[in-house]
Image (spheres, rainbow, N blue to C red):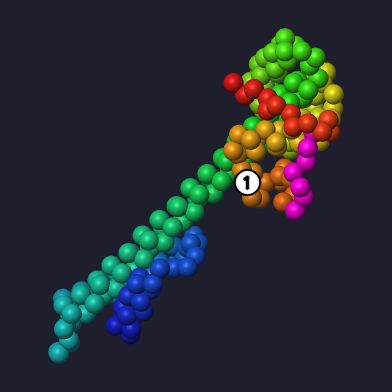
């Protein structure tokens, strides 16, 4: 039985798991190691107290030890896969947050740029908006709200026209020009099967100055 278990574990180690291990798999492997150690301890006790004739206790211990080593190797490998999956998920979440934050900020800068009459007013409005976007309460609002909600709220707060779709379209165009790729499963992304929208004015707006 121990030899069969040993062979099965060898096969498992030699074949890389197709999917990352779940937390439950790691617990099962930990329990399996404990069982193997129990067998080893029981074998040692039998060898010391009531050894049976013809039984190679050293070979039996070696077999259990080899099986335990293979189990520990598998547990370590699966544990690394779980850690890598967690790190990858954290990176995706951070990328989603960065994309959302930049998209809202570009939309607000686009609004400030579009409603300005000349370069002097553009510089003044854009500077004011950039300063306001760094305020803690604004950062918190952006983090806690979907892009359309945040843009609408900030437009009302700062006296800018509440043309949310237009400002977000301009932000998407600016992000495309800057080389940013929308996250695949972000809820604020424009549908992939729709053409990229353009500014209502018919001209492609200059991307807002992000500093």
Residue reaching furthest to the top:
120
Q: Nearer the viewer, residue 90 or 151?
A: 151
Please tell me whether the stretch drawn in magenta is mainly helix, strand or loop. Answer: loop
- Secondary structure at badge 1 equals loop
- Which corner quadrant of the image does residue 41 belong to? bottom left
Which residue is drawn at the image coordinates 56% and 40% (left, top)?
94
Residue 85: give x, y in percent of width and height: 49, 54
Q: Is residue 150 visible?
A: no
Residue at the far front in the pictured view: 203
Q: Which residue is mark 1?
A: 183
Magenta region includes residue 167: no
- Picture layout, residue 83 above or below residue 38: above
Residue 191 picture location, percent across and down:
75, 49
Q: Residues within 10 Å of mark 1 (few under 14, many from 20)?
A: some
Which stretch appears magenta?
193-199
Is 92 situated left or right of 209 in this image?
A: left
**Residue displayed at 58% across by 44% down:** 93
- x and y, in percent, of residue 168 in the image: 75, 34
Does residue 198 show up magenta in the picture? yes
Residue 201 picture location, percent across and down: 83, 30
- Choose top left, top right, bottom left or bottom right for residue 107: top right
Q: Is residue 183 left or right of residue 150?
A: left
């Amino acid at each position: 039985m121990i030899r069969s278990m040993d062979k099965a574990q060898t096969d498992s180690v030699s074949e890389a798991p197709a999917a990352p291990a779940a937390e439950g798999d790691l617990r099962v492997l930990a329990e399996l190691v404990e069982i193997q150690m129990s067998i080893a301890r029981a074998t040692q006790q039998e060898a010391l107290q009531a050894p049976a004739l013809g039984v190679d206790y050293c070979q039996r211990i070696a077999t259990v030890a080899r099986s335990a080593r293979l189990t520990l190797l598998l547990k370590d490998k699966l544990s690394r896969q779980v850690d890598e999956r967690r790190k990858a998920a954290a990176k995706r979440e951070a990328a989603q947050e960065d994309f959302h934050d930049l998209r809202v900020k570009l939309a607000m800068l686009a609004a400030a740029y579009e409603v300005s009459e000349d370069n002097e007013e553009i510089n003044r409005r854009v500077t004011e908006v950039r300063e306001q976007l760094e305020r803690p309460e604004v950062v918190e609002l952006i983090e806690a709200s979907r892009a359309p909600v945040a843009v609408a709220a900030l437009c009302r707060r700062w006296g800018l026209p509440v043309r949310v779709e237009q400002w977000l379209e301009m932000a998407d165009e600016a992000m495309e020009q800057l080389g940013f790729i929308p996250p695949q499963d972000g809820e604020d992304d424009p549908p992939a099967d729709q053409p990229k929208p353009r500014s209502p004015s018919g001209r492609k707006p200059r991307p807002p100055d992000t500093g």
